[in-house]
Image: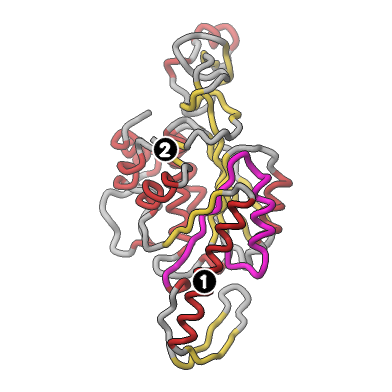
Amino acid sequence: MPSWRALLGNLRAEAGSLLLSTAPPPDADAGPLLDEDVLRQIERLSLAELGASTDGLTGEHGGRRKTQAIEFADYRGYVPGDDFRLIDWNAYARLGELFVRTSLAQENATLTLLLDCSRSMDWGRPNKLRYAKRLAAALGAIALLHHDTVRLCAIGDGLATLGAPLHGYHALSTFVEELEELPMATTTELRRGVEAYRRICDHRGIVMLISDLLVPAEQEEAVSYLAGAGVTAAVLHIVDAAEAAPTVGGAVQLRDHETGDVVTLTVTPRLRRRYAARFAAWSQELSAYCAAHQVRYVRVPTAVPPAELIVEALRREGLVGR
């Protein structure tokens, strides 16, 4: 696996320094999705060995399938990001195609990131969608640095837009570009979006849904669909502090960020306390429902930097490891 310094140099050469920066931006929302500090914190992490199905042959997870190693077992086609040292140049001279030597030592996991791109995510300080993209970029980097495969799927308006599978650390700049260019949806319709994903992708690997889950009575159905989408499934619940415990008071107008509907009400201290208690109870209910369906649930406060969240909360839940 390349060091983060070498990786940073490679990505800058490929992306013209547009995607990565060593200097912290004055506006966190306007900064790069992935930077030197994040790479330094996650470079030793990998996807946990959670029993997820594996479909590639170049990963770093121990197993019985064929993958790259010194002890020869078989050949497979070259994939961008593979180690050039394992290419059989004699076979290339004879056949005109690139093949790599494999063994029975390692396996390749596939991580699919389902990212909620609805308008409700496009809010908050920091912006929830920007934060979710940074979290996804770091998770994708963990997988790609260890020669696992990553797929990005945008969820919104009841649809699922699935990207191509990416493999190897050389694909990291492509992955970050895909994150930057994801189209914004209007509504969530989370249940239909997860259902649509399952219709277009039958791969069973590690699937993580990144969403604020602000949908009317659809969370449980979405979790039910997600439970069958992979051998390992997880919900990363994006939570803004102002949503969990608002500080507004007096007469206010609340506008739904997706529908535009407006509600006028008077917010009293008692009402704020009741709301905060209900929000906490709702989070607990979601966690319990996920646990009952064998889906990992992680509450993700946007006040916690993505790398710190991964190192602490996701390691605690067994989603990543060293």
Outermost residue to the left:
23
Is residue 216 rendered magenta in the image? yes
Question: Above or below — where is 242 with respect to 303?
Answer: below
Question: Counting residues from the N terminus, which is met first, the one under dot 2 or under dot 1?
Answer: 1
Q: Residue 31 occupies which quadrant of the picture?
A: bottom left
Question: What amino acid type is highlighted by mark number 1?
Answer: Phe
User: Above or below — where is 235 with respect to 275?
Assistant: above
Quadrant where the N terminus is found in the figure: top left
Residue that appears at 54% across and 40% down = 111
Graded by Cα atoms within 10 Å as few (under 14), some (14 to 19) or many (20 or more), the crowding at tag 2 reads some
Kindly state the secondary structure of the residue where label 1 is placed: helix
Q: Where is residue 198 drawn, in percent x and y?
A: 70, 47
Q: Position of residue 60 (x, y in %)?
A: 46, 26
Q: Is residue 5 left or right of residue 259?
A: left
Residue range of the region highlighted in magenta in the rendering: 213-241
Residue corresponding to mark 2: 321
Q: Say if the magenta span includes residue 47.
A: no
Q: CA distance from mark 2 to mark 1?
A: 30 Å
Q: Position of residue 206 (x, y in %)?
A: 57, 40
Does residue 202 appear anywhere in the picture? yes
Residue appearing at x 60%, y 44% in the figure = 163
The image quadrant that residue 85 belongs to is top left
Label 2 sits on a secondary structure element that is strand
In-front residue for pair 158/214: 214
User: Where does the C terminus fall, quadrant-wise?
Assistant: top left
Residue at the spot 43% in from the left edge and 87% down from the top edge: 269
Q: Which residue is mark 1?
A: 279
Q: Left or right? Give the position of 90 relative to 35.
A: right
